Amino acid sequence: MTDTHCPYCALQCAMSVTQGKVSPREFPTNRGGLCQKGWTSAELLSSPARLTTPLVRRDGALHPATWDEALDLVAAKLRELRAEHGPDAVGVFGGGGLTNEKSYLLGKFARVALGTSQIDYNGRFCMSSAAAAGTKAFGLDRGMPFPVTDLDHADAVLLVGGNPAETMPPFVQHLKGAELIVVDPRRTATAELATLHLAPAPGTDLALALGLLHCAVADGHLDQDYLDERTNGFADAWRIAASWWPERVERVTGVPVADQRAAVRILAEAENAYVLTGRGTEQHASGADTVSAWINLALALGLPGRRGSGYGCLTGQGNGQGGREHGQKADQLPGYRKIDDPAARAYIQDVWGVDDLPGPGRSAYELLDALGQPDGPKALLVFGSNLVVSAPRSQHVVDRLGALDLLVVCDLVLSETAAIADVVLPITQWAEESGTMTNLEGRILLRQAAQRAPEGVRSDLEVLQGLATRLGQPVERFPVEPEVVFEELRVASKGGLADYSGVTYDRLRAGEALHWPVVEKSTPRVFLDRFAHPDGRARFIPVDHRGPAEAPDADYPLQATTGRVLQHYQSGAQTRLVKELVDAEPEAYVEVHPDTATRAGLREGELGAVVSRRGRTVARVRCVPSMRLDVVFLPFHFAGEGRANLLTNPALDPTSRMPEFKVCAVRLESV
Ligand code: SF4
């Protein structure tokens, strides 16, 4: 029996694996609970869809090849493209599910072995807006700056744009003692649990947050002592919120004035209160500002950095937190260092033994959009991502991938992206390899290998070493043992914001609860004494409502929003392999109000088409009376013509560069 953690989301529920079977394990975040995804995760280990040999495209089809043939071919092509077009001709795309060790070594591989600036990852699609807003407000981005178990003592929780009752069900037990206020355009499973459900029109959350700040001031709930002692900038934020009186907010968002006031009153009167945000706040062209607006509300009520209260972001992907700290992001170096900071560059150059490093590269969507263009990458190496399903404006991304001279995909199965690659490299998965993950509360966990990988597969670390040495790098610069990589990561992160220098595998094996920064001791609560700005104070960020990048019109009169379902994870590349999950949720669907369906000539259970300016998705109609008349909802886990991302708008947030997954204009029609 091996103690490890779930392969999926950021709650990283503890489990044991025994002879290919999982059982839940007692742990603070899941307290012995697992969701249906976790319970069935062992099925991945024996999936008949598993790849066990590299594949190379010849004459239009993928054929089995040896590892030497595949790696030699990739390295030769990379050398050729770099010689012809320069180092930025090669791009690298990572993932928020990769372990810290892989994220770290991938960033090093891109910048040292390839010399390219063109690296980013799919976390740009899901957590970068909260990261940007948290950094602005607090000087540091640790999604949840307190342990999850602190929520057990909450009297009130405002949860904005998150649906943990479906995405991470064991988390919900921590909210049981609180009055729960949920902000979501849909009546989700989580909204069903709430005392108060506020349902703003998609893309208007920022206006709602401004309205709640207005109510906080107008109704006398401002915590003036906290503002004076611990914050800067309230006056500038208030100058904007002052004009968002509740009646105006109701007109823009649809949320009744009485509900706005009630939400603020519940939070303000609670002794212990929290504001939590999820992807619904972030995945907008104004996502970073929207998160800032909710943080402003939390600051006005005096919550962040106070024991028993706070603000936190619910991270989504398994290593969504650690994955953004150690260098696979276009603008970052390990330890959450900024790549354009001369001191940070000098430190990392010294750790890596190199004289120079590339500068910042393109963000994820901009990188994909540039593929095969005259000044864009000609080759792309993909690790831990299924871009064909998960990227916005999906058909355009498929076209860009098709314009490459070389697409290399590392995956455990022939995902939709692997299926169009030139070279596919079969890799190990969660229970077959060790490595650390950093969960949603900033706690570093050790996932331990529970069984041997099938013959023929290699780890991502082995792939990186195999390619790096073929590109002329010394073998010792790219170790394949996770613990050795972690030892180097400790040094590279030392002195950075996300300092892991005091974390060791031995401490993790002993079960120590280590929340970063860990120089020596763990820091479970980051901001109790001071925030991370040089003056120790948090910042109000002045932000105003802008609305969605694409408004409904006569041709596209509805708004589509996207999200998750209980049974599937991310692009579904893993969960669509598990029979029990597929039986429960087998195909793409679109939730609509019955009247909206009728107007489109559609009935419950029929196939309908959802059409945006970018594409057309075919999905099974589900009539849901609680849906707004002007909104349709599509889960984004499905492939083929059911891809929700055929519709989505890649309008980018100016700060976080996150695409607007959560709202676009569509029409509904019969197939
Ligand atoms: S998917 Fe998330 S909530 Fe479900 S068992 Fe895994 S870690 Fe826990």
Image: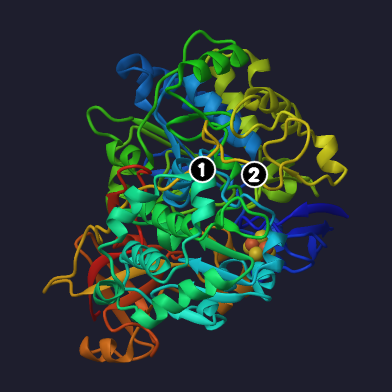
Q: Quadrant of the C terminus?
A: bottom left
Q: Residue 27 lies in what quarter of the image?
A: bottom right
User: Residue at horizontal 62%, vertical 57%?
Assistant: 8
* Label 2 CB-ligand 1 distance < 8 A: no
Residue annotated with mark 1: 138
Question: Dot 1, how many residues are within 10 Å of its Cα: few (below 14), some (14-19), or many (20+)?
Answer: many
- Find residue 562 and report its horizontal and vertical position in percent: 39, 67
Name the element at disc 1: helix
Residue 217 lies, in percent from the top left, at: 40, 64
Q: Are marks 2 and 1 in contact (CB under 8 Å)?
A: yes
Q: Is residue 568 left or right of residue 503?
A: left
Q: Amino acid at mark 2?
A: Val
The residue drawn where x is 56% and y is 53% is 304
Dot 2 corresponds to which residue? Answer: 526
Q: Amino acid at mark 1?
A: Phe
x and y percentages locating residue 592 in the rendered image: 34, 83
Q: Can residue 621 be spotted in the picture?
A: no
Q: How is the image coloured?
A: rainbow
Q: Does residue 610 lie above or below 369 as drawn?
A: below
